[in-house]
Amino acid sequence: MIARISEGKIYQLYDNEIFVFGSNEAGIHGAGAAHQAYFMFGAEYGKGEGLYGQSYAIPTKDYAIDKLPLDVICYYVHRFIDFAYQNVQYDFLVTEIGCGLAGNKVEDIAPMFKPALELENVFLPRRFSKFLLS
């Protein structure tokens, strides 16, 4: 198992690359990586989960924009991993979802992505690696 790393801030994508960001279930992309996804990579307002343009939304907040419980975030992360498994034509560049405005710790979110280590088309943030490879 080798972790593929998505390096730092992402400002441009190749045609086959998808920007994976933390969202809210309401799809209000008003700040952080969600705002970037909306303005730069085709995220759609009102769409809180899934592939839109060159972006994939993983909810980390609920419809009221409150922090989701970790088990619910994990559910959405695993839905993303299933999607990535079924869509090998894309490379998914994952941001530190849930670790910014949602206020979660990297050590709580990173292990949710452990099944993605088996996928060659998922690139994870460098800060996730120490919680995945130990």
Image: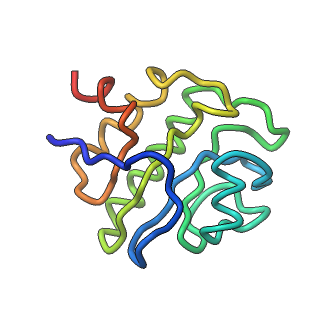
Taking the spot 34% from the left edge, 51% from the top edge, the residue there is 123
- Vertical side of 128 occupied by 83: above or below: below
- Pick out the residue farthest to the right: 64
Q: Quadrant of residue 92?
A: bottom left
- Vertical side of 97 occupied by 132: above or below: above
Q: Quadrant of the N terminus?
A: top left
Q: Quadrant of residue 14?
A: bottom left
Taking the spot 50% from the left edge, 46% from the top edge, the residue there is 95
Q: Quadrant of the C terminus?
A: top left
Residue 18 locus on image (x, y percent) = 46, 65
Residue 81 locus on image (x, y percent) = 39, 51
Residue 52 locus on image (x, y percent) = 60, 70
- Pick out the residue farthest to the bottom: 15
- Vertical side of 38 occupied by 66: above or below: above
Q: Give whichever of 108, 34 is nearer the camera.
A: 34
Taking the spot 39% from the left edge, 75% from the top edge, the residue there is 16
